[in-house]
Each structure stands twice: as structure tokens, then as C-alpha cells.
Image: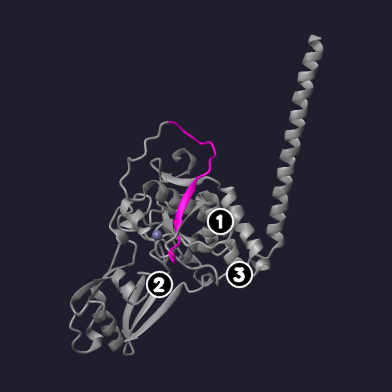
Amino acid sequence: MKYLFVLFIFLCAFTVFVMFTVIAEGDIENFILSSEHEIYFDTTENTEDIYIETETEIQDDEIIPGGFITETEEETEEKEIFISVMDAKTGGVNVFELEEYLRGVVFSEMPSSFEREALKAQAVAARSYCVYKIIFSTESSREEHNGADICNDFRHCKDYISYEDAEKIRGEENIAPLWEKVSDAVFETKGEIITYLSEPAIAVFHAISGKETESAENIWGNYIPYLVSVDSEEQNNIEEIRNYATESMFSADEFKERLTSNGFDAGFSGDAAFWIDSSGIVLNSSGRVDRVKICGEEITGRKLREIFSLRSTDFVLEYKNRAFIFTVRGYGHGVGMSQYGANLMALDGRDYRDILTWYYTGVKIDTAYKFF
Ligand SMILES: [Zn+2]
């Protein structure tokens, strides 16, 4: 009887073992199938009508000094995380499961034709930003967002598009494979964020860097140890990046009119050829324009970017052929991860962890779950 009982237990254990093996093999099969789909579908499709070249700014009150999280013990068990999102158009607030929401964010924030590892880096950066906002949103930030953690305005927080809306714009057959590719990037990094000194990092990013990335301190005045200037790959691959350099031209009258209507009145007398001179253009530590002297008055590079809708503060300003010409490199504020730089690194064989630790100095790839 005793032997029969032992045999019964053995048979049960064996059945459970066989079941698990079959399930695991099924998973592997699904994985291979989805990889084959990746190769089968043409993912180089132009997605520009959906993808918005953008940048995520840090709002004035957003940086909170460290020390708010007291870790009790490492909690890494998977759990659902929810994020409340204000629709910037209607002001209505919806709650999403974070992983689900991120698919629409990554799809919208980065061209889905980009390399898989770049998309994964983007997924982790966006997840970190969201987790930061869920945990650290200030009262005034919540007021701006009708109580929500974040909004879907790309100029303010993160852009987002739902699958249904993307499909309406480009049709199911174009969208489905790209959506699957982006979903995979989110899924394969599920729950991963970057942390600095064990706190979620505010992982801002931008489209294209000129030569090197910008430090947060040069832009927002706060020194953030993981948002400091690093070299970016774009400088070695200028030909491959559409609109790496752009030019904006203004007649002397237009130049003067734009400045004065924006509250910068420097007198502007005499020949326009003498309004600026190269010694009056001061660059900051990352080589971008810090300030410019125009007719003896100083104006910041950031203000000029805003007034003349320049793509970045990495510009050269000259007066040539009776016109003021801005020759601009890159696109965005330049802080944090460069999306095009991330894609070049991925093409070079680097994985998403390499990309993230390159652009965000001193961070760790960590789990979000321990913060919830
Ligand atoms: Zn917002």
C-alpha cells in the first residue's frame, strides 16, 4: 500500500513535469513565430504621418530632490501598474494599465521602423518617465492635469496614439505589423525602468543630437547627475539622418520684428550687418548657443530657438546677403537619450541596456514593481 502511494505521487509529479515542458515549448514556438513575422513584414514603411518628432521637457516644478523613497525590501513580483492620463484636448481623465499605455506611447514617440533595441530603449525610457510621474507628481502638476499623473500632449508630457486611431490614419495592413513590433519592444522590457540611486529616473529624450547631448543644467538650470552631456553617434552619420542640419533665413526687418514683438527691443539702429558679431555669440559646455549679443543686448539661445522656431539651440547665426541665417544642427532640447543616436547604436550591435546606460549616466536597469 505504502509503495502504491509513493508510485501515485511519482506519477502525479511526472504528469505535472510533462505539462510544464509542453507549455514552455509552446511559448518558445510562439516566440519563434513572432520573430519570423518580424522578418516577414516590411518594417521600413514610412511612418511619418503618425510619428511626431518630439522631445519631452521637464516642467519647472518637476524635479524633486532625492530621498523620498524608503526601500524596505526588494519587491520584484510582477504586478499591474496603473497610470491616469488627461486627454489634452478634452480635459477628461482615463486610467490605463501602464504596459498597455506604453505601446501607444512608444508607437507615437519613435518611428516604428527603428531597430528593435532602440525601440526597447525607448520603451524603458518612457516607462521610467511614467513611473516617475506616478510617484513624484507635484500638487501643481496634478492641478494642471485635472488630477492625473500625465497628459497626452507631446509638448508637455508624452504623445500617445491608440491602435484604433493609428489604424484609421494608415489602414490595418500597414499598422498591424508595426504595432506588433512596438508591442514586442514593450513586452520584452516589461516592468523595466532606469533608476538613479534607487529612484526612478526622469528619462527625458529628444529626436536628434548635434554632436553631443545637452545637460539638464544648461537647459532647466537643475543639475541632474544622469542627465549630463555625452557624445552621440549622429555626428559620424550625418548623411543618414534626414534634416540633421536645417537652415532658417530672415530678412533684417523680419528678424527685428520677431524679436521686438517678443519683448526683445535692442534699438536695432544702423546697418544690420553690425547688429551681431561672432564674439557676441557665447556657447555653453555642450557647444550649443548659451547667449547672443544683439545690438549690445543679450538674449539666450533658448529664447532665440523659441522666437524663430529653430529645431535646436545648436546653431550658427550669421548675416549674409542681407539676411540673418540660422544653420541648425539636430532636433530637440538635446537632453537625455537621442532617438536617432539610439537607433545608430542599435545598428552598431549595441543592445537597449548599452543605449540607456550610455545616454543616462550612472543609471541602473531596475524593476518598477518594487515601487508599487
Ligand atoms: Zn502634461
Q: Which mark is residue 168?
A: 3
- 276 left or right of 128 in image: left
Q: Residues within 10 Å of mark 1 (few under 14, many from 20)?
A: many
Label 2 crowding class (10 Å Cα cut-off): few <14, some 14-19, many 20+? many
Report the residue marked by disc 1. Answer: 103
**Inter-mark Cα distance, 3 to 1:** 17 Å
Q: Is residue 47 above or below residue 78?
A: below
Q: Which residues are magenta?
A: 73-90
The quadrant of the picture occupied by the N terminus is top right
Identify residue for label 2: 311
Magenta stretch, main secondary structure, is: loop
Magenta stretch: includes residue 70: no
Q: Quadrant of the C terminus?
A: top left
Residue 211, x across and y down, in percent: 41, 65
Q: Are marks 1 and 2 in contact (CB under 8 Å)?
A: no
Point out residue 205 in the picture as x, y percentages from the top left corner: 43, 59
On the rendered structure, is 175 left or right of 55? right
The relative height of residue 71 versus residue 81 in the rendered view (above or below) is above
Kind of residue sitting beneath label 3: Lys
Ligand 1's quadrant is: bottom left
